[in-house]
Image: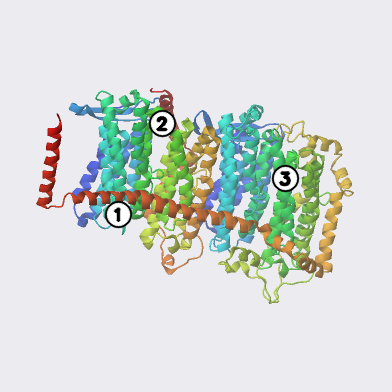
Amino acid sequence: MTEMQKLYLLVPLAPLFGAIVAGLFGKIVGRRGAHIVTILGVATAFVGSVFVFQDVQAGNTFNGTLYTWATSGGITFEVGFLIDSLTVMMMLVVTFVSLMVHLYTIGYMSEDPGYQRFFSYISLFTFSMLMLVMSNNFLQLFFGWEAVGLVSYLLIGFWYTRPTAIFANMKAFLVNRVGDFGFLLGIGLIAAFANTLNYAEVFAKAPALAAMTVPETGWPLITAICIGLFIGAMGKSAQVPLHVWLPDSMEGPTPISALIHAATMVTAGIFMVARMSPLFELSEAALSFVLVIGATTALFMGFLGIVQNDIKRVVAYSTLSQLGYMTVALGVSAYSAAVFHLMTHAFFKALLFLGAGSVIIGMHHDQDMRNMGGLWKYMPITWITSLLGSLALIGFPFLSGFYSKDSIIEAVQLSHIPGAGYAYFCVIAGVFVTAFYSFRMYFLVFHGEERFGKAVEHDAHGDHSAAHGDDEHGHDEHHHGLAPGQKPHESPWVVTVPLVLLAIPSVLIGFFTIEPMLFGDFFKGVIHFSDSHPVMAELGHEFHGAVGMAIHGMTTLPFILAMSGVAVAWLFYMKMPAIPAAIMKTFKPIHTLLENKYYFDKFNEIFFAGGARLLGRGLWKVGDQTLIDGMAVNGSAKLVGVIAQLTRLFQSGHIYQYAFSMIVGVFVLLTFWFNRA
Amino acid sequence: MTDTPFLSLAIWVPIVGGLLVLATGSDRNASLARFVAIAAALAGLAVSIPLYTMFDVATSAMQFTETHTWIPRFNINYALGVDGISVLFVLLNSFITVIVVVAGWEVIQEKVAQYMAAFLIMSGLINGIFSALDGVLFYVFFEASLIPLFIIIGVWGGANRVYAAIKFFLYTLAGSLLMLVALLYLFMESGGSFSILEWHKLKLGMWDQTWIFWFFLASFAVKVPMFPVHTWLPDAHVEAPTGGSIVLAAIALKLGAYGFLRFSLPIAPDASQALAPVIITLSLIAVIYIGFVALVQTDMKKLVAYSSISHMGFVTLGFFIFNPIGIEGALVQMISHGFVSGAMFASIGVLYDRMHSRQIADYGGVVNVMPKFAAFFMLFAMANSGLPATSGFVGEFMVVLGAVKYNFWVGFAAATTLIVGAAYTLWMYKRVVFGAVTNHHVSELTDINGREFAFLSVLAICVLAMGIYPFPVTEVMHASVTDLLKHVAVSKL
């Protein structure tokens, strides 16, 4: 094993070590010990990733096996690493955001009795996510895939006495399992027809796979594989209609909403499709499917962000919408733009979530924006960093989100695959929606009238609890709110320092990295696009430097839409608050539809959850109890009984009956005997 | 190779140990009985370990063979041997016996010696089943092993134990008698041999193969249990004491599945091929139908029992798709199911010992008072839902891969377990463990003690180790599975 290989190994194992120490020996090491060991682990992973990055920049990539997991039927199942530019970019993002979130957690969770457990989980998550992105084969990908799902499950249900939390975590796991179902079938088809699970070997066989069909269905094999894999991505990256778990995942503590449900885990699906670009490029049908799903998510989940009052839920729906943008980029073969947006989004969305968390601390765990307002005066660092994050999110020129989102929009415009027209409409309309809900939140939280500390208190989760039919919150301490007369206060430095450190890349990283990542050689040989989908190449012709792009961007439609979104938000929520109320009244049906999140949850609950229980009860009562046990088993027991009853008649114990039968018998036999001749 | 008769030791050490335990007499000597029992169980495990460490993975031939004449007049021999298919089950059985003895340590207060003896004797008999190479010897072990389990359920079971015990006994006995007919027919056809390996080579017509296949199926399907002859299992589990449930799930269910590989497939290969669609259909029904039935159970033990049936559906599915990844996946699933279902029943036992209830509705918020237990139970629940890095994943994954290769729709149907399996397991976990404490019985619970911690950790290590590194397990199987598939591919007609 070379020095570099040892380093590759160190990167995931350091957080794992931290997780084990904090998790199994939390009592012994104590609260301080737990955060020191996990933060050291993740910091080691980050520093290691930086070294790996430099090594990859120098042109050294790696694709090798760590150990053989199992062998069977000619397939070698392995655990191994593939280190290239895509991997190392993900490693940097994951470890950096994770490190910020670890620091932040010291402040955010300081009063929680489950402190060590929390650190153990987030370090375990970091390990799992690193194994996912560093994998060189589908088996390990699936391992990481499910492992991050497990940690997400554990963290959403972190406050395990809250009924909503333990409902949300089960829902998240099961919805993800629906995605994994497709994912597993995709992997199964690859194993069956390529006879290997190693990426490089599968890619080498991709042209041959493209010529095959699935024998039982007649489907083109490559399309079946890609759609199967993408269904997995739909679960993990929360695309319609498997998005339903993500808003509910906000039941977990805010640091993990930032790390798992915004910056890293939910982007696993995007990463995976980008990694599989050599396969997806071969199936136009799969790409169109990806495109339409992504576009729908981008626009329609954005609408839902407008009607939310819980600060975390606004950010959650914004995440859904942005994941839709990334998916759209995948669909038009702009993989590098998707990954680029993944990276910029990781920074500004983590920033927005941690900012929201800081507001929540300041508000003493009240999450309802209707109780906020004017916070800029009391929480200056949170205010400025949140503003920067919001500007990045809406794609303000020169900020990171501008470069990534604008590239996606232009790529969609250049694409000609089926569905591109619809997608273009969705992403362009989405720009306005994004700007509107982002600045609605910004104005409601940081500006305007100070509404906190009033006697009237809305229940932050009111709408949500009603949807589930449970009204009580076990964990009351998380829903205090400020007492009358009490003022919010800026959060401690462990909270604000990560905000500042995340604000820096949110502003700058797009400017500095767009050229190498989108139009340079950074992803050369890693991300493929075929000659029939040349959007990135065409985009490259129009690109004349980051400055030029930003200046040009100020004259285009997306910029105008974004600015009008901000203006409308300002008008509605600062200037004339009567307008939104009036609109709400006029368009009552639409508002109800949005309030109920298009009735996805109700449908799933009645049709799938209720249907499954009904089916189970039916099969049990009718199949097992009535048919099998009632008729077949006890029926045959009864039949034996009946036969016994009948035969018993012949054994009555009365001598005269036996004697009579003997006489009859003898008579019959004699008759035969004499008539034989 | 060695001259030490390890297989005979694996059979007779526990049986003699069991008789010694019986000799300790009444409950006045209960603690002596316990110590003799654990010593015997550990000795049984110790003599089984060389079977793995000295196993030659390169050959498909029988290893550690022993042959002694038993009843010369009928050419019946005391013939033992293991190959890559059976050797792991001897180990699993010896291991589970140790767990069972520890799990029943203080829990069983009445007729301690008899309880421990029953498990030890059964352990020896089951090792006999997995290593017998003579038809009659197999049959004797196969039937004899019923008796201890019957007694365990009937004596130490719950309120409705007699009904459950008799249902269990009649069900399995009925199947066995048909198997006996098939064994005797094979004896005559082969010109007077009870050697199972001879039977593998025996030419048989399609008609003969077909009815022999059905007769074996009658016996094995009940043991597995396959749909629709599965209804004895939930009843037996509900009434059995914890130890009985562990052995039943971890070991006894494997006997039927093992029978398919040792008898049905090699003796009647053409019939097996022809009737595979029937078995595959029944297996998929087990996976899906039983999964939904498990979802609505209100009794934890019944839920896990139904989940066992569903998981065993994967085993029979894997066998009858006739590709190496399917069969090896099915074998891995059998071993893993031994750990996972054993652990699930052990965990439920931990709760039952404290609350004397198996009803999910009686629990809620257990994590607040039993955090250590909740962590173990979480691991086992995840393994039961087939999470990667636990043993539960390996077999399911391999069988699904094999099934997709065989037929996309078969794979599709099998993969639904990913959703349904997680649904019933996690829903139960949520209602039992998560939430606020619901009643004062739960609030009075105490977390696991040292003994419980010990056996749950051992099981946890097995579940994780096999999930992270199954190579040592799959490696043992290759030669024998390849040989079996080669054999099945050649027509006997």
Q: Name the amino acid, label 1.
A: Tyr
Task: Give me the chain letter of mark 2.
Answer: B
Cα distance between the residues tagged 2 and 3: 47 Å
**Residue B342 relative to residue A229: left or right:** left
Q: Earlier in the sequence, mark 1 or mark 2?
A: 1
Query: Going 37% across and 55% down the picture, which residue do you hit?
Result: B349
Nearer to the camera, A481 or A323: A323
Respond whether the residues carrying marks 1 and 2 are from the same subunit. yes
Q: Quickly name the residue at label 3.
A: A292
Q: Quickly name the residue at label 2.
A: B272
Secondary structure under the numbered disc 3 in the rendered image: helix
Q: Name the amino acid, label 3.
A: Val
**Foreground disc of the pair 3, 1:** 1
Q: Identify whether B67 is placed above or below A79.
A: above
Count of numbered badges drawn on the protein: 3
Nearer to the camera, B298 or B354: B298
Nearer to the camera, B267 or A155: B267
Q: Quickly name the residue at label 1.
A: B163
Q: Residues within 10 Å of mark 3 (few under 14, many from 20)?
A: many
- Color scheme of the displayed model: rainbow
Query: Going 13% across and 44% down the picture, which residue do you hit?
Result: A664
Q: In this rendering, does residue B27 appear at all?
A: yes
Q: Residues within 10 Å of mark 1 (few under 14, many from 20)?
A: some
Q: Quadrant of the C terminus of chain A?
A: top left
- Residue A588: horizontal and vertical position, in percent? 74, 65
Respond whether the residues carrying marks 2 and 3 are from the same subunit. no
- Residue A628: horizontal and vertical position, in percent? 39, 49
**Foreground disc of the pair 2, 3:** 2
